[in-house]
Image: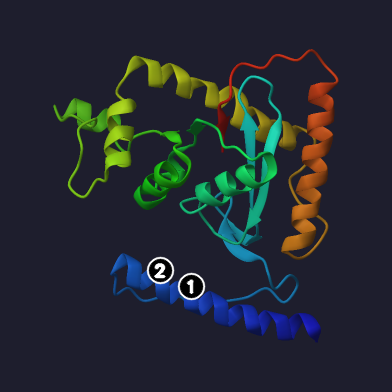
Amino acid sequence: MERLKEALVNLEEVKKQREEHARHEAKDTKQKEPRASSTDPEARKMKMSDGGYRPAYNGQLSTEVGSGIIVGVEVSQAGNDTNEMLPMLGQMEERYEQVPGQHLVDGGFVNKEQFEQAKKDYEVEVYAPLKEEKKQLEEGKDPYKPKRGDGPAVAEWRARMGTAEAKEIYKQRASTAEWANAQARNRGLYQVRVRGLRKVLTVLLWYALAHNLVRVSGPARCQGQRCQG
């Protein structure tokens, strides 16, 4: 009964989120009836790697380049990563009283407003792939020039990603962030046996501690202060 009552509360939150998303996207499309899980009311239906949809949480790990140490852990109810970068930077500032000078993220984190705020609040240089970069080049367009509506930080990001140096730096993301995520899978972290945001976060924190213990018990190989999500 308690879980069903909580599911009804979360159902209202889901409705509000969908309405806000529809307003933001300015689309007048028919929305499916929102649903909430009676098993885990705080979970949200998300698209999984196999193409299916299931109740889930969005787990975030931020990893230091070179050492492979996990420096940030977060769990959210968002089905995508577009608003997840700033909370992670804020967490790192709170934990370590500093933020990385360079932040490497994948295409799912690309968000103009977040890029501008990251530059304004933290002086962070963001490295992320440009949308349809290859296609634009094939069409004779310059993907590295500022676009209409770009702020200064976004314009800098576009120009930065056109340099050979930035492309070499970004290659490090695969061997750090993707590697850390793959390690989690290899160690069996596919599902959690708990319910609720706080408990799921606890599981990820325990995992991060174990991961870091394994890393520091071996030879230290730190290469700079780049962190990534």
Task: Provide residue 193's location: percent of width, then percent of height.
Answer: 83, 57
Q: Residues within 10 Å of mark 1 (few under 14, many from 20)?
A: few
Q: Nearer the viewer, residue 88 or 17?
A: 88
* Residue 20 can be seen in this image: yes
* Residue 34 can be seen in this image: no
Task: Provide residue 228's location: percent of width, then percent of height.
Answer: 56, 34
Residue under the point 78% across and 64% down: 195
Quarter of image, res 22: bottom left
Q: Which residue is mark 2?
A: 21
Amino acid bearing label 1: Gln
Amino acid bearing label 2: His
How far is mark 1 from mark 2, CA to CA?
6 Å
Quarter of image, res 176: top right
Task: Provide residue 179's location: percent of width, then percent of height.
Answer: 64, 27
Secondary structure of the residue carrying numbered label 2: helix
CB atoms at circles 1 and 2 under 8 Å apart? yes
Residue under the point 59% across and 22% down: 175
Image quadrant for the C terminus?
top right
Residue under the point 40% across and 68% down: 21
Location of residue 215 with respect to 188 vertically, above or below: above
Residue under the point 75% across and 51% down: 191
